[in-house]
Amino acid sequence: MISLVDKEDVGRAHVARLASLSPLTHADLAALDDAALNFTVVGARREITNEDEPASCPRLLLHGWAAHVREFKDGRRQILHVFIAGDLIDYWSLVPAKIVALTDVYLAACPVAGASQSGLGRAYALSAAVTQSYLFRQIARLGRLDAFERTADFLLELEERLRAVGRAGGDSFELPLTQETLADCLGLTNVHVNRMLQQMRREGLIEISGSRIRFLDAERLRSIVQVRSPKVRRETRKKPLSIVGATD
Amino acid sequence: MISLVDKEDVGRAHVARLASLSPLTHADLAALDDAALNFTVVGARREITNEDEPASCPRLLLHGWAAHVREFKDGRRQILHVFIAGDLIDYWSLVPAKIVALTDVYLAACPVAGASQSGLGRAYALSAAVTQSYLFRQIARLGRLDAFERTADFLLELEERLRAVGRAGGDSFELPLTQETLADCLGLTNVHVNRMLQQMRREGLIEISGSRIRFLDAERLRSIVQVRSPKVRRETRKKPLSIVGATD
DNA sequence: CGCGTTCTTGACTGCTTTCAAAGATGGTGG
DNA sequence: CCACCATCTTTGAAAGCAGTCAAGAACGCG
């Protein structure tokens, strides 16, 4: 049986997120509330979309977690992007993607932006831009951060995004992902993810109980990502890719 | 002194690319030709855009190579995306990004799509979608491919993209990037990129002379990326992330 | 021709994976 | 309420891939 969430909880996150991107009119809000009224439930581990049958229309993720995943023939797997409550799943009828529910998920059809000048239309555009910026962050994370930094950065990103939709209270939040799923996000093995989390616990950075994770020292966590440790990785003076001098 | 390219060469790539995405009207083509007439030149290693001053408008990259790069405080560097001739540099006034010229670069302001129904407008939208799909590929590459596979996949991607704009003849193309820049794309060190290229040469996969690279066995190269080698990495039967059964 | 950049190579280190097995957890049915 | 089962987490030992360091060769430009 699927565990239900409070009715008032369903349908808040997406409003919070979109409204924070662009001021919404009453019509916009009404459209969003309307859309949230009849949602679809997709069970954990079920496919929301796959490479063969692209989505018919953009959706709002009202509740739960989903992932855009790419699978290789030999079983390797990479999660390209994680969707949380409030996110727009709108890319793309054009780019076929496999998106799976990581938990039970509540989806609603995305109301079309009435006037193209409506706040809703702009919110959608901004949402896409924000999503893209998280893709960039994911690339940088996978390309240049080591396992420990990667894990820290990813947790910080999740906390930041969850907080924006009221899903991170105080300094803790629900993280209903297995360490294997985490590993698929981070390009690591489940074993190594486990070791990194252990290390964070030992160092007093985080605390995990059940599926809830708490930041004990968010500041230090953040500083880890910027530059791992002052001594280990000394400021390698590498030739800059770009020149500072006068433009042109 | 900046080496000039043939006049007829400037301004072909972007037309080829956009027209292949959506049929263009005469007006569209005229607008593109117009735009290409007065281009700006940005010297190699100069910044096209940086985090502080976002681009004022979308640009067409008429000629040359550019990169969206992210730099860390400690000197680490990751190239998030490479732009080649014909590409649209349009993301985003919204998401500040540092984009540098990897070679001398010719840029033109992007003509605004007249009617929102114009082929040009749709070409822009599709261009953004295609770019996004390359970001996904970059994530999968960095997350789950080993150094050899990564290098192969990246070269294949470049060939494919260059071919689409007539910049890859036969089985070879100009690759005006240093191995260090390549390393920044691939999340590797310049030393290791060198070793991977050496290995590809030894195995008769590629041939490099100057800045020109030739695929000697594109088919085998492609097969490498799919599944590295049948023996080394045996079909790990990992629990599937998603369920195949009936939907809902 | 000389100089700086880029490429190449080898030896060594170390981070991450692999393999294997034991412990914890949660849900189910008796 | 407990036993059981599947799933998930945890741990150790060993192997392997990629990074680091260093130095020499090749290349291109002025």
Image: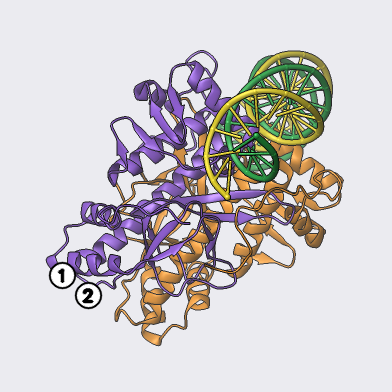
Chain colours: A orange, B purple, C green, D yellow
Evaluate whether label 2 is on the same chain as label 1. Answer: yes
Task: State the image coordinates of residue B227 (x, y, percent, origin top left).
Answer: 45, 24
Task: State the image coordinates of residue A227 (x, y, percent, origin top left).
Answer: 76, 53
Left or right, B2 with respect to A209, comes to left
Give the letter of the chain under mark 2: B
Q: Outermost residue, bottom direction?
A: A26
Q: Which mark is residue B27?
A: 1
Task: State the image coordinates of residue B12 (x, y, percent, origin top left).
Answer: 26, 54
Task: State the image coordinates of residue A55 (x, y, percent, origin top left).
Answer: 31, 53
In contact (CB < 8 Å): disc 2 and disc 1:
yes
Q: Which mark is residue A130?
A: none
Examine the rendering and report whether any part of residue B212 can be seen: yes
What's the amino acid at mark 2? Gly
In the picture, residue B70 is in which quadrant? bottom right
Q: Which mark is residue B114?
A: 2
Where A101 sits versus B220, above or below? below
User: Who's the residue at 55% across and 56% down the image?
Assistant: B45
Examine the rendering and report whether any part of residue B235 can be seen: no
What's the amino acid at mark 1? Ala
Callout 2: 10 Å neighbours few (<14), some, many (20+)? Answer: few
